[in-house]
Amino acid sequence: MQRRTVAFSKDSSNLFFHILTKCNLRCKHCYINRDEHGRETLDIGTIKAWLALFLDRAPDTNLIFLGGEPTLHPDLAPAVRAARQMGFSSITIDTNGYLFHDILEKITPEDVDFISFSLDGATPATNDAIRGKGCYDACIAGVKRAVAKGFSTSMIYTVSGANIHELHLMPAMVKDLGIDRFFIQVVGIRGESAGANNDLQVTRERWLETVPLVAEQIAETGITVTWPKVFLNPGEVFECAGIVADNYFVFPNGRVYRCPLCEDYPVHGLEIRDNQLIPTTTLNETAFFKLTIPEGCVMNKLVQPGNITYGPDGRPEQKIACCMLKQEIVPD
């Protein structure tokens, strides 16, 4: 198996395009904040116009259609086909598995590179407590339908204090599903979870003793596994993707962020007005990217410091990596 750190660079970019914020679910850890991201459902003309803003980077850009739930958008299929014609490097649809508007009948495996399903528990009891009653069965059924139709599929498991106890059950569960990739995400304390009285964040010790081991076990089943670095090793240098890479998080109200941890606040570095991508002129997220602190990521320290621990001398015991820094295992 090939193990590597997936470093970000100017040679490739990711466009996370939220075409609506409407969703049929209300997941406890959802990062969508409609007061900050808007309640609009973009029409197909606007979607195409906004995609065109990134045409100069399209051949090097991975495009991810998001929501809310993107399959709730009646024009997702023509949006996907338009993106393919524009030449984006890869196209992914992130979905909760309900697959509205018969989306699997309206696109082909040649139109998208991946359909990515979100599942947050190895059992219905754990997953549905987070995502809603019936979501587990709907997601598994959606995966099976997509695989049967020849789509390349992936699965996202957002690790939190509410479900890390079941992560070790996932290798056996996904082995026979036919998925191609497995993504382990770390919960972000923003959106629905911001300000909540909960224990969603996972300690460094529990993360490190659980996630890399399970990732290796899943890779042993033949599935490529990707997960966030989160905690830098001693001596590793912190780098911010906001400086080093081109990543864009686009929301229906026109805000364009470069850092996902900033999304609860009106500090977006770019915005789309009259179908033009322009920099904001007030204090914005780019001012934070260049700051250097012992804790590593400045935005993590500001908005979700619960994953940082300090020694008796008051110094942080570890640096938090940029949330875009990933680790990966590719089966031979």
Image: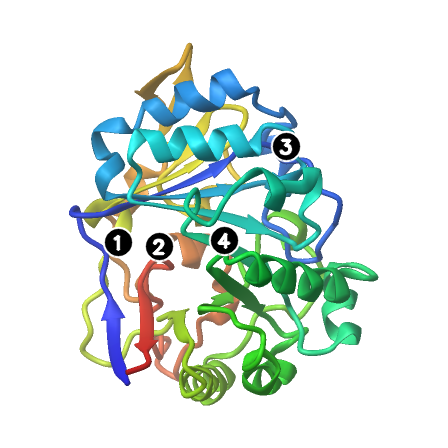
Compared with 270, 71 (above or below) is below
Q: Nearer the viewer, mark 2 or mark 1?
A: 1
Q: Residue 24, image x and y in percent?
A: 75, 44
- Earlier-in-chain disc, 4 versus 1: 1
Compared with 243, 169 (above or below) is below
Q: Which residue is mark 1?
A: 240
Q: Which residue is mark 3?
A: 73
Which of the two residues, 324 or 44, is positioned nearer the viewer here?
44
- Earlier-in-chain disc, 2 versus 1: 1
Q: Helix, strand, or loop for circle 4?
A: helix
Q: For the residue marked with disc 1, what is the amino acid? A: Cys
Compared with 58, 318 (above or below) is below
Q: Nearer the viewer, mark 4 or mark 3?
A: 3
Q: Helix, strand, or loop for circle 3?
A: loop
Q: Residues within 10 Å of mark 1 (few under 14, many from 20)?
A: many
Let me know if residue 106 appears in the view.
Answer: yes
- Earlier-in-chain disc, 4 versus 3: 3
Q: Which residue appears farthest toward the top when viewing the image? A: 274
Q: For the residue marked with disc 3, what is the amino acid? A: His
**Image quadrant in which the C terminus is located:** bottom left
The dot on residue 298 is: 2
Q: Residues within 10 Å of mark 4 (few under 14, many from 20)?
A: some
* Mark 3 → mark 2, Cα distance in angstroms: 35 Å
* Mark 4 → mark 3, Cα distance in angstroms: 31 Å
Q: For the residue marked with disc 4, what is the amino acid? A: Val
Q: Is residue 306 left or right of residue 124?
A: left
* Mark 2 → mark 1, Cα distance in angstroms: 9 Å
- Earlier-in-chain disc, 3 versus 2: 3
Name the quadrant containing residue 73: top right
Residue drawn where x is 44% and y is 71% of the image: 308
